[in-house]
Image (cartoon, rainbow, N blue to C red):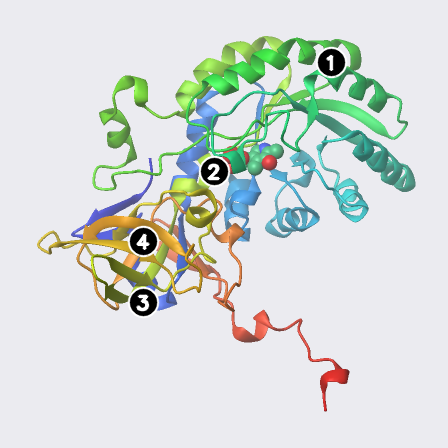
């Protein structure tokens, strides 16, 4: 469930009229609903009550400092994947000591930063990484807490670019050699074996792959607890969300309307399936959800620049582009597009929804039907809160979008639109080109 709905035909985020935000701060602008994040967080936590649970929000989904602070206020820790993300946690006032550091390519500098911040666990993806973390910890006179990422070789049945738990993916260590990896890790003097980790992919819409993966690694996790006294099992993230969301009725009503066998995954289904498997372990359970917590909490506001009528094809040309929201171009992702002012009296318009970038791939949707729209009117891409702004680029020298956070009737700019000056601040023309 989310807090975007029409009030008198005007799309609102909580109690804020989004057209007012677009007029005040311009477009493209991301807008996030604090209450939606709160609801998602509490709902997920509630679905796993009874476990010794820690939710480490996978901040690569949306790492705006205000969003991170909101998560910290809710009691969340963080799943981070770079030194930059760690610095964001610290800058937002988040608890690095409860957070975990993932990723296949941690540099020495990043490892040092994470050791100094006292992260709860390094999620190790290879044997050379064990050696490197041990080396850096030794130099600092510390013991690094680690968990090895197990690749259970389970098909997450999601998009090829976001599946991570198959043996052909670059992630983790195969279950077949995981025991050797732990034995090797135990020999390093500056490592402490604190946990075990897995993450099989993103945007999973059925619970079966999660269950299969947990069942597959469970005996090994029990073995690790006996042999090394590990404290935690991180089951990763990956809970999918509903992108095809009939806004008029809200996500829950849409979900209820689906035939029972075709309903997408909910935290309740996820929790009910995993709790009986995880509870008997007697370990701390870490969850690393990203998309589920923030995906439906955000929209991308955009302005219609032109309606170009072609022969047999219309193009609605927006001021947002693939650099602002890359998911459709990169993952063939679907995003709902709705007008900020709904007018049911208008005729329908069928058009390709495109941005201004010089790439055929700069297309958000093909043959989408929505109400007739024209220059200067505003639209919103729904469910753009995850992997939206964080994957944005400056391609075509387009500035990074603005970001706004809403809470009730209040809203505040939490990231100013980038200026040309800051975009080129690091660039210079070398002396040898100056004639
Ligand atoms: C990306 C990632 C997540 C979060 O994935 P979501 O699909 O956004 O929940 C969690 N854990 C790891 C290790 C990741 O790489």
Quadrant for residue 232, please give it. top right
**How much space separates mark 2 and mark 1, taking CA atoms?**
30 Å
Q: Is mark 2 within 8 Å of ligand 1?
A: yes
Pick the front one: 366 or 340: 366
Q: Left or right of 143: which side holds 278?
A: left
Q: Earlier in the sequence, mark 1 or mark 3?
A: 3
- According to the picture, the residue beneath numbered tag 2 turns out to be 291
Dot 3, how many residues are within 10 Å of its Cα: few (below 14), some (14-19), or many (20+)? Answer: few
Is label 4's Cβ within 8 Å of ligand 1?
no
Q: Secondary structure at mark 3?
A: helix
Taking the view exactly as shown, the residue that stands out farthest to the left is 345
Q: Nearer the viewer, mark 1 or mark 3?
A: 1
- Number of other residues with Cα within 10 Å of mark 1, as a class: few under 14, some 14 to 19, many 20 or more: some
| Mark 2 crowd level (few <14, some 14–19, many ≥20, 10 Å Cα) | many
- Residue 206 image position (x, y, % from top left): 42, 22
For the N terminus, give its image quadrant: top left
Q: Residue at x 51, y 34 (%)?
A: 160
**Residue highlighted by disc 3:** 23
**Mark earlier in primary sequence (1, 4):** 1
């Amino acid at each position: 469930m989310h807090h975007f709905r029409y009030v008198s035909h005007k799309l609102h985020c909580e109690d804020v009229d989004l057209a007012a935000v677009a007029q005040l701060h311009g477009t493209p602008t991301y807008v996030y609903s604090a209450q939606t994040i709160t609801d998602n967080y509490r709902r997920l936590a509630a679905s796993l009550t009874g476990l010794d649970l820690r939710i480490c929000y996978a901040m690569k989904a949306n790492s705006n400092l205000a969003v991170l602070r909101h998560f910290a206020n809710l009691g969340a820790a963080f799943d981070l994947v770079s030194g930059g993300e760690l610095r964001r946690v610290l800058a937002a006032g988040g608890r690095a000591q409860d957070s975990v550091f993932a990723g296949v390519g941690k540099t020495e500098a990043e490892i040092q930063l994470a050791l100094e911040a006292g992260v709860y666990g390094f999620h190790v993806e290879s044997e050379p990484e064990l050696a490197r973390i041990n080396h850096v910890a030794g130099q600092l006179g510390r013991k690094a807490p680690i968990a090895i990422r197990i690749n259970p070789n389970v098909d997450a049945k999601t998009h090829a670019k976001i599946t991570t738990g198959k043996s052909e993916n670059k992630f983790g260590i195969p279950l077949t050699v995981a025991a050797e990896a732990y034995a090797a890790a135990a020999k390093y003097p500056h490592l402490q074996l604190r946990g075990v980790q897995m993450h099989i992919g993103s945007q999973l819409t059925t619970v079966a792959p999660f269950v299969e993966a947990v069942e597959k690694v469970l005996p090994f996790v029990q073995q690790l607890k006996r042999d090394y006294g590990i404290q935690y099992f991180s089951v990763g993230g990956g809970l999918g969300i509903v992108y095809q969301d009939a806004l008029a009725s809200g996500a829950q009503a849409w979900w209820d309307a689906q035939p029972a066998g075709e309903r997408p995954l909910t935290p309740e289904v996820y929790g009910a399936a995993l709790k009986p498997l995880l509870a008997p372990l007697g370990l701390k359970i870490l969850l690393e959800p990203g998309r589920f917590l923030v995906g439906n909490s955000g929209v991308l506001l955009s302005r219609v620049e032109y309606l170009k009528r072609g022969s047999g094809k219309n193009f609605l040309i927006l001021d947002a582009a693939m650099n602002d929201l890359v998911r459709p171009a990169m993952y063939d992702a679907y995003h709902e597009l709705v007008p900020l002012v709904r007018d049911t009296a208008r005729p329908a318009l069928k058009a390709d929804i495109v941005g201004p970038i010089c790439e055929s791939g700069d297309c958000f949707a093909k043959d989408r039907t929505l109400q007739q729209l024209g220059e200067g009117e505003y639209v919103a891409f729904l469910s753009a809160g995850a992997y939206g702004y964080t994957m944005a680029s400056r391609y075509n020298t387009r500035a990074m979008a603005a970001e706004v956070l809403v809470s009730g009737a209040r809203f505040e700019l939490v990231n100013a639109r980038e200026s040309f000056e800051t975009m080129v601040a690091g660039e210079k023309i070398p002396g040898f080109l100056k004639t």
